[in-house]
Image: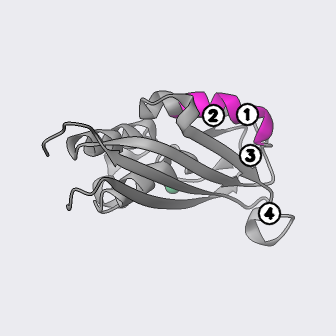
């Protein structure tokens, strides 16, 4: 990988909803009258964040390192995926400049969760919450997301070369 001063990455993920009483979002349990379907804990925000970091590093994607069909990834906490991506980032000599995201869903409403989500993501990514931006978007009743059959998430990250790192 070419050691540039900055590297940008984008991540996207979508999960189907199903019957249930809550979801994992940004490493937090959120009470909603449905669940999300996935082999792991289906944390759409953490999956998109993991892919954004790996993408910035030019380093494959989440499915390469954690195949969804692998038994050890069944019901696995997505915090593991983020921690792996952060370790890859640090090994490559980068730190997270900032992360921005859109959580696209009709429910839950993101605004009341924003500060907790920021804190949760900042803890997992080992940065100040000031570097994390959380935005919620309704899909205005349109398509699968608008019909509450899915939740999607977009994440952009900017990585910067850590000062004095020789790698
Ligand atoms: Zn996912």
Give the residue number, with chain letter if any, for mark 3.
34
Residue at 35%, 47% (x, y): give it.
160
Q: Looking at the rendering, which quadrant does residue 28 occupy?
A: top right
* Callout 1 touching callout 3 (CB < 8 Å): no
Q: Nearer the viewer, mark 4 or mark 3?
A: 4
Mark 4 closeness class: few <14, some 14–19, many ≥20 residues within 10 Å? some
Mark 1 or mark 3, which has the lower sequence index? 3
Indicate if the residue with disc 4 has its beta carbon within 8 Å of ligand 1. Answer: no
SS at badge 2: helix
* Callout 4 touching callout 3 (CB < 8 Å): no
Give the residue number, with chain letter if any, for mark 2.
117
* Callout 2 touching callout 4 (CB < 8 Å): no
Residue at 56%, 39% (x, y): give it.
132
Give the residue number, with chain letter if any, for mark 1.
113
- Calculate the distance from the C-alpha at mark 1 to the C-alpha at mark 3: 17 Å
- Calculate the distance from the C-alpha at mark 4 to the C-alpha at mark 3: 17 Å
Mark 1 or mark 4, which has the lower sequence index? 1
Q: Residue furthest left?
A: 166
Between residues 8 and 72, which one lies in front from this camera angle? 8
Compared with residue 30, is residue 53 higher up or lower down, i.e. above or below? below
Q: Main secondary structure of the magenta part?
A: helix
Disc marking residue 139: 4
Residue at 52%, 55% (x, y): give it.
156
Mark 4 or mark 3, which has the lower sequence index? 3
Mark 3 or mark 2, which has the lower sequence index? 3
């Amino acid at each position: 990988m070419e050691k540039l001063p900055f590297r940008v990455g984008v991540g996207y993920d979508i999960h189907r909803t199903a019957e249930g009483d809550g979801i994992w979002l940004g490493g937090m349990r959120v009470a909603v009258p449905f669940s999300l379907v996935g082999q792991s804990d289906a944390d759409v925000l953490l999956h998109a964040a993991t892919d954004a970091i790996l993408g910035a590093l030019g380093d494959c994607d989440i499915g390469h390192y954690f195949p969804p069909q692998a038994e050890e990834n069944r019901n696995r906490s997505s915090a593991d995926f983020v921690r792996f991506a952060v370790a890859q980032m640090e090994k490559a000599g980068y730190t997270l400049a900032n992360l921005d995201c859109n959580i696209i869903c009709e429910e839950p409403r993101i605004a009341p969760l924003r500060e907790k989500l920021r804190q949760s993501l900042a803890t997992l990514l080992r940065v100040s919450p000031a570097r994390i931006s959380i935005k919620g978007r309704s899909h205005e009743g349109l398509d699968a997301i608008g019909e509450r059959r899915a939740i999607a998430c977009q994440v952009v990250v900017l990585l910067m070369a850590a000062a004095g790192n020789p790698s």
